[in-house]
Structure formats: C-alpha cells, structure tokens
Amino acid sequence: MSTAPAAPEDVFITGYGIFTGHGFGDEALRDGVFAGRAAFRAVERFDTRPFRGRHAAAHGADGPPLPGTVPDPRHTPSQREALVACCRAALDMAGLPGSRSADVLIGTQGDHRGVTAFWSGPHGASHAPGAGSGPATGPGADVAESLPAALADLVAGDLGLTGRRMAFVNACVASANALLHGARLIRAGLAETVVCAGAYLVEQEFFAKFDAGRAFATEDRMRPFSADRTGLLLGDGVAALVLEAGSRVRARDADPLGRMSGWGMASDAFHVCQPHPQGRGLAAAMTAALDSSRVAPEDIEYVNAHGTGTRINDTAETRALHRAFGSAAGSLAVSSTKSTTGHMLEGSGAVEAVISLYALRHGLLPPTAGYGTPDPECDLDWIPNTPREAAVRRVLTTNAAFGGVNTAILLERP
C-alpha cells in the first residue's frame, strides 16, 4: 500500500522585529520609512575625517531606542544586542515567547565593530548581554562575534532556541537568502518554526571600503531612480521574522500576518560588482518568484526595489522590472525605501521584507524619498516623496548583491 506524499506546507509570517536608523519597532517604521523621512545624519560613531563620506542613516539619540541600550551617537550597539532584541520582539508578536525548538537563520558578515576598536586603539571590555549568557568581555568575545557562524550561534543561545543555527554571508542578499532557505525548510516539511534575521550596523571598516570605492552619494541624501542621483549611503538595519508552517499555525489557532507564497534566486554571472546591464539575473529571480506562487505579473501591486541610488544599478533594475513584468510594468507601483534607511547591506533583505509586510497589512505604500528629476532610463512609477494609500494584496521585495546574486520574495495577505 503506497502513501501519498504530504502536500507542501504553506509558509506564514507570524511575527517580526525591526531596528533602523529611525529607531526600534513599528512607531519608528511608520514615522520614518512610511512618512518618507530620511534618517541620514553626520556620522559621530567614529572619525570620518579620513574619508570623503560623512553621512549615514545611523541611529542616534532620537527615535525609539533599541531595548536594553541607551542611545548614544558615539556608540555603535552590537549586532548581537540588536539581533536578540528584534528576534525577541518577533517571537513575542508571534505568541511564541517561550518557544525553544525554532531554527535561527541569520544574514550577516559578523560584527566587526569590536575587532576594529581592538586593533585601532586601547581595548576595553565589550558587553553584549543575552538571556542567561552573561556579558561577553575581552578581545576573544569581540573576535567571536566577528565570525558570522559564531554570531548566529550566540544569538540562538541568548534566545534559548535549540534548532538549526546558520549564517548566510552573500552580501546584500544575505538575509533574503536566510528567508528563502527558511521558507524552503518549512515547505519541505523539515521545520515548523524558523526565525530568519539579518543585521548590519554602520561601523568604520565597511564605511571605509565603500568610501574607497567612491560609492557614496556626494550629498547627505540618496535619490534612487532620479536623474540627479549620485550614489548610496549606508544605514543601520536589523530585522527578524518568524516563519511558521501552515499546519502549526492552524494547530495553535494563530493569526498570521502574511504568507510568503513565492521566492526566487538567480545569478547574473556577469561581473563581480556590476549587475547585468539588462538586469537579467534580477528579472530571472522575480520571474521565479511569480512562477513558484503561480501569480501573474499583473497580480503584483507593489515592488520594494533594491534601489541603491547608483547610476548603473538603478538603470539595470528598471530594465529588469520591464523584463519580468512586461506590459504590466507600466501600472506597477515601485519604491526604494533605502532612500530613507540607507543601504543596510546584509540586513537589507530582512528589513525590506518587514517594510513590505507592513505595506501589505496597512494599505500604505512607502515613497522613494529625495526623488527629483525624472530619468528617462528609469521610467516607472516610483511613488515619489510622499506615501500612497493602496489596499494591496500581493507585493514583491527584491535585492541584489556583489557577485551577481539576486533574490525576490513574494508576500500575500494570509
């Protein structure tokens, strides 16, 4: 007697936590990203005099603080602190504060804040509190948190979670990759609950690298898709989402926030830093997300674009959207919320998934802040400067990274 294979599990989002340059939680998200207010300011965490760049969307003393820390523009909180705070908020929202069996998947390059301080001057004790973990002190703790896999392990331990612990390091799609992998585990019946997160907090090492590459905007703002765009700026970005199998959600009578119904990942295989000029890899990722959810292009009502504000990337992304959506691209609402948060590197995918989920739930589309002169090569509806009310049912969020890797995640109302 043969047994029919189990039907693929639905993947639901039941909770989230978020921290950006605007601060922690929904209030900061609403008053910052969804109001079109940019969080850029002069960096005070480290000396910017050696650099051309001076600005980033780094959280200061205003806005809701990260729980457990005192806002100080001269101090960078640790990724471990921010990840634990966001993961706890996500588990609380999901109604799973005492859960212990969840997997933890994190997109991060590790926390280089303490290591940079150790090698550049006198090294003091660093404190990264976690539930039952006690303070981490001395250079050994800093080095451990600079290793992506070790950081994921530490965060899971702080949360008391006993499932898989994995780190994803493929640059600006790292936390989107964590979400994709978590969804695959659930879809295949290999996991019931997965906490997917991503983190980047503005610090000196990566600031110096982007400055040396002349990637920074020449002003104190980003203008994605606008003809007068001059480059990107970095920003704080940490977020966590709880993914749950449909069977588990139904068994505990939970109220899901959204459904992760499709996803795609594709490579340009074109250049180590530049996207394919026609956006082939990103278009392939978007098409895969549509196909996997059996949704037609015209059924997508909003796209949260990668939108870095750089000349090459924005043009290639526009072409990718035309390629993936065809005639439906003309009626598509698109925005780059990096115009308010800055580029959050490994944290981008998770943060922008939360932003897209918020838009889905509240019927409010975030604008592209700083938009000025239209660019004929970027000829879509970019929701310029002011938010837009729209009761959308399906949204897509995209990310792209060095190495030519691209992701797309499709979210629906539950």
Image (cartoon, rainbow, N blue to C red):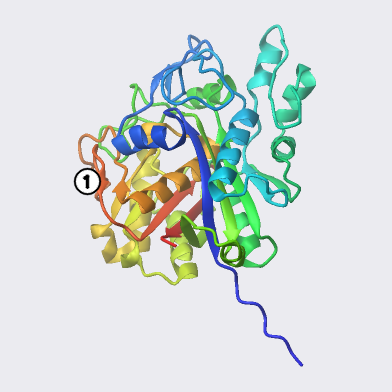
- Answer with left or right where residue 169 lies relative to residue 408: right
Residue at 62% x, 25% y: name it: 78
Question: Tag 1, which secondary structure?
Answer: loop
Quadrant location, the N terminus: bottom right
Q: Residue furthest bottom?
A: 1
Residue bearing the label numbered 1: 376
Residue 291 versus residue 160: which sits nearer the camera?
A: 160
Q: Is residue 249 above or below residue 226?
A: below
Confirm whether residue 174 shows in the render.
no
Q: Is residue 62 above or below residue 337?
A: above
Q: Residue furthest right?
A: 140
Residue 309 versus residue 23: which sits nearer the camera?
A: 23
Q: Amino acid at mark 1?
A: Pro
- Answer with left or right where residue 313 lies relative to residue 8: left
Q: Position of residue 306 (x, y in %)?
A: 42, 44
Q: Is residue 120 above or below residue 306?
A: above
Quadrant location, the C terminus: bottom left
Q: Position of residue 58 (x, y in %)?
A: 46, 23
Q: Residue furthest front?
A: 253
